Image (tube, helix red, strand yellow):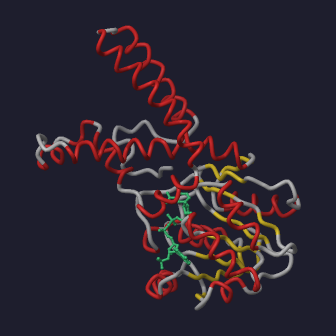
């Protein structure tokens, strides 16, 4: 494949940055990749693993001469790194990010950047419950959606180039505005994570259910919740703090539905439950038909999520 960017800088060197680095190298679409993470241990691991060619001692040094800079840090750290890289950005460079929330990231990043760079926010809808530099892998983005949320002032050529980059990593592209993005991911990702965290918390809290019973009998559905509830605490704290309105909106609707089902159970309304579950089963089928999961009976244990 032809080269899309000469130099790419990854700020934050965990699961997502590692996967970008491996996938970009495999596709042959970048000349070189530099990186920066907060800790020396992470920087050393990234260099040794080889998903970056160089690491720098500061975010500013990492982005010097880069044509594309991708912020791969937790949402709550975006403002700080934007401030740190701003003076060193190459005029005409594209700055992007992978944050799970978009409006809050735009608000945090944009004020710090000079006018001669393009900030094009993005969110790859792919991940696992693992984090850190050792968690990345080249196939993470294959056939997953990358949501690009261009800003009205963006140069269309810069947006198109970023889309080409994500396509080369294996992604399918969808563009939408930031507000719509935050609502969509509240339904598909953020509220489900909160529900999983809650369900695991409930089981953990029930002293009548011994630890062994919860662990040994977990295959009955609970196991899938525990996988999601093992997701990185820093990342998910930042997601909920920064997508407050949309998440609360969806959780309000969720609570209404839950009460309706609770009432159906109390009244012994089997028809209501049967119809509801028939409808939700059709949603699952449409996800499989769209190639976003397999029908294999070990659903959820080997695939990517988010
Ligand atoms: P991760 O594996 O925990 O990696 C985060 C990286 O950011 C680490 O290298 C960490 O460095 C670095 N970092 C944290 N604070 C920093 C700071 N102030 N300055 C410089 N580096 C800093 O996280 P991830 O899963 O790759 O997630 C990164 C971003 O992708 C988040 O915004 C998240 O919302 C988004 N995202 C995640 C998923 C998912 O499922 N995981 C999916 C899509 C999008 P140290 O190791 O030195 O602490």
- Which quadrant of the figure contains the N terminus? bottom right
Q: Position of residue 75 (x, y in %)?
A: 57, 63
Residue at 82%, 58% in the rendered image: 160
Q: Position of residue 23 (x, y in %)?
A: 59, 67
In front of the other: 63 or 34: 63
Q: Position of residue 31 (x, y in %)?
A: 72, 80
- The answer to which quarter of the image holds residue 161 is bottom right
Q: Is residue 90 shown above or below 170?
A: below
Residue 114 shown left or right of residue 214 in the figure:
right
Residue 29 shown left or right of residue 297 in the figure:
right
Q: Is residue 44 shown above or below 285?
A: below
- The answer to which quarter of the image holds residue 99 is bottom right
Number of callouts: 0
Residue at 70%, 57% in the rendered image: 167
In front of the other: 253 or 5: 253
Residue at 67%, 89% in the rendered image: 61
Residue 278 shown left or right of residue 9 in the figure:
left
Q: Is residue 288 shown above or below 97?
A: above
Q: Position of residue 295 (x, y in %)?
A: 43, 36
In front of the other: 198 or 46: 198
Residue at 36%, 49% in the rendered image: 301
């Amino acid at each position: 494949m032809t080269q899309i960017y000469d130099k790419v800088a990854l700020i934050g060197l965990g699961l997502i940055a590692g996967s970008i680095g491996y996938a970009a190298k495999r596709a042959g679409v970048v000349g070189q990749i530099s990186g920066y993470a907060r800790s020396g241990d992470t920087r050393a691991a990234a260099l040794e693993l080889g998903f970056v060619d160089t690491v720098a001692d500061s975010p500013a040094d990492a982005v010097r001469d880069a044509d594309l800079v991708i912020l791969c840090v937790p949402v709550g750290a975006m403002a700080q790194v934007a401030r740190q890289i701003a003076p060193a950005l190459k005029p005409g460079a594209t700055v992007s990010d992978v944050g799970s929330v978009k409006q809050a990231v735009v608000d945090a990043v944009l004020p710090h950047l000079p006018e001669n760079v393009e900030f094009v926010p993005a969110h790859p809808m792919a991940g696992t419950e693992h984090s850190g530099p050792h968690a990345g892998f080249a196939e993470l983005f294959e056939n997953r959606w990358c949501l690009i949320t261009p800003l009205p002032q963006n140069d269309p050529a810069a947006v198109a180039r970023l889309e080409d980059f994500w396509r080369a990593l294996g992604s399918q592209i969808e563009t939408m505005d930031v507000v719509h993005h935050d609502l969509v991911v509240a339904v598909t990702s953020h509220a489900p994570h909160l529900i999983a965290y809650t369900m695991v918390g409930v089981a953990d809290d029930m002293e009548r259910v011994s630890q062994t019973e919860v662990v040994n009998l977990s295959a009955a559905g609970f196991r899938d919740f525990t996988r999601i509830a093992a997701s990185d605490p820093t990342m998910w704290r930042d997601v909920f703090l920064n997508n407050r309105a949309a998440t609360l909106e969806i959780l309000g609707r969720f609570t209404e539905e839950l009460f309706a089902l609770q009432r159906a159970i109390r009244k012994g309304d089997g028809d209501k439950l049967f119809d509801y579950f028939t409808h939700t089963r059709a949603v699952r089928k449409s996800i499989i038909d769209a190639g976003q999961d397999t029908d294999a009976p070990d659903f959820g244990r080997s695939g990517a999520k988010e």
